[in-house]
Image (spheres, grey):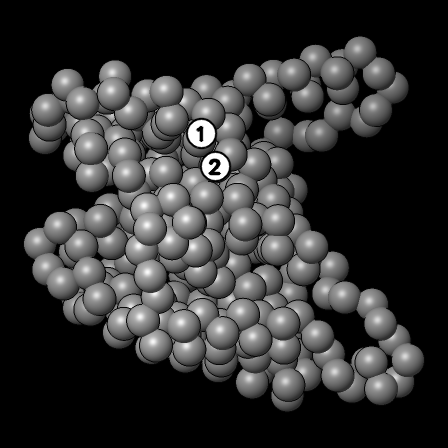
């Protein structure tokens, strides 16, 4: 339970801080700085712990392309959090857990129990309700929240990326797989950042100024707390019951939702609050199953 709550705290703070950082320096800068910080931190951890890295060649053919998918997932996530509202984007992203469930059914021949099926339906229904303001629809306004399309894209990509990383962790170990994946992802982001920088220099686009120290610290914090949350979840799943860890970690959307409402004065519709509750309740059902 403690490890699951640690994961919820790390992931929830990461979403909230990413929203703040994205609105100060942009989602692109935030995701690059955060992933570099996470890669450096996990590399230092590997040097200290010195785990067995012999299983990496076996998982590398899958982890390398998965790094590109994960990079795209993080980029779209931070863009969605930048556009907001956080109280809508973060709960929708939490439904990524449904994707690995269905992939396990198709690829591994696993079947859903009755409680799992109910949890999946409730979670998807909650995501749909969270993304729709019924008051606006009745008023004739069918516009979706600005960050919603990015959240949906990120959800699908994170679902697939999580499935692959879960398999890699079982094959090569949690820390070696996480280290190799983060290092590869950092390389992808640095290459993309270099490409974008060169294109800007070759055009008449206005150059952005340097990142303020406070904004840099915030973006680094995004990467570090996300890494802590992931390690906490993986460690808890290894030493305890996966269902208990999942139940505790599935509450992480509460942190960015509360932060968006209290700190950014976001005001979702009552039906969207109900959708948030359904998303969390559906995830808890999946975890209990």
What residue is drawn where x is 48% and y is 37%?
Answer: 70
Q: Is residue 9 left or right of residue 188?
A: left
102 or 152: nearer the viewer: 102
Do callouts 2 and 1 mark residues in contact (Cβ within 8 Å)?
yes
Residue 31, label in figure: none
Instruction: State the separation of the CA atoms marked 2 and 1.
Output: 5 Å
Is 217 placed above or below 179 here? below
Do we see residue 148 in this rendering?
yes
What residue is drawn where x is 25% and y is 20%?
Answer: 58
* Rendering coords of residue 107 (x, y %): 38, 44
What residue is drawn where x is 50% and y is 22%?
Answer: 188
186 or 94: nearer the viewer: 94
Q: Which residue is mark 1?
A: 67
What residue is drawn where x is 38% and y is 54%?
Answer: 105
- For numbered disc 1, what is the local secondary structure? helix
* Rendering coords of residue 82 (x, y %): 64, 52
* Rendering coords of residue 232 (x, y %): 22, 52
Residue 116 found in image quarter: bottom left
Residue 246 found in image quarter: bottom left
Q: Which residue is mark 2?
A: 70
Q: Quadrant of the N terminus?
A: bottom left
Do we see residue 42 in this rendering?
no
259 or 106: nearer the viewer: 106
Residue 205 found in image quarter: top right
Q: Quadrant of the C terminus?
A: bottom left
125 or 94: nearer the viewer: 125
- For numbered disc 2, what is the local secondary structure? helix
The 10 Å Cα crowd at callout 2, few under 14, some 14 to 19, many 20 or more, is: many
Q: Is residue 246 left or right of residue 36?
A: left
The 10 Å Cα crowd at callout 1, few under 14, some 14 to 19, many 20 or more, is: many
Q: Residue furthest front?
A: 109
């Amino acid at each position: 339970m403690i490890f699951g709550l640690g994961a919820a705290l790390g992931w929830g703070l990461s979403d909230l801080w990413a929203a703040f950082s994205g609105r100060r320096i942009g989602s692109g800068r935030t995701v690059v700085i955060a992933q570099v910080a996470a890669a450096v931190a996990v590399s230092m951890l590997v040097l200290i712990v010195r785990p067995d890295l012999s299983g990496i060649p076996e998982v590398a053919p899958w982890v390398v392309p998965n790094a590109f998918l994960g990079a795209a997932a993080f980029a779209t996530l931070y863009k969605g959090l930048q556009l907001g509202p956080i109280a809508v984007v973060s709960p929708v992203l939490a439904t990524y857990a449904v994707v690995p469930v269905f992939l396990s059914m198709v690829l591994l021949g696993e079947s859903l129990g009755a409680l799992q099926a109910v949890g999946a339906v409730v979670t998807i229904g909650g995501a749909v309700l969270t993304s729709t303001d019924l008051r606006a629809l009745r008023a004739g306004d069918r516009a979706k929240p600005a960050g919603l399309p990015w959240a949906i894209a990120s959800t699908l990509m994170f679902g697939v990326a999580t499935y692959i990383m879960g398999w890699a962790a079982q094959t090569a170990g949690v820390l070696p797989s996480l280290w190799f994946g983060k290092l590869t992802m950092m390389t992808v982001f640095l290459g993309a950042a270099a490409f974008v920088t060169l294109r800007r220099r070759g055009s008449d686009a206005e150059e952005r100024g340097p990142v303020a120290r406070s904004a840099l610290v915030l973006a680094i914090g995004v990467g570090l707390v996300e890494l802590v949350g992931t390690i906490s979840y993986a460690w808890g799943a290894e030493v305890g019951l996966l269902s208990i860890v999942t139940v505790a970690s599935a509450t992480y959307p509460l942190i960015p939702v509360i932060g968006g409402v209290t700190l950014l004065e976001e005001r979702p519709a009552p039906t969207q609050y109900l959708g948030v509750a359904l998303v969390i309740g559906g995830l808890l059902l999946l975890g209990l199953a």
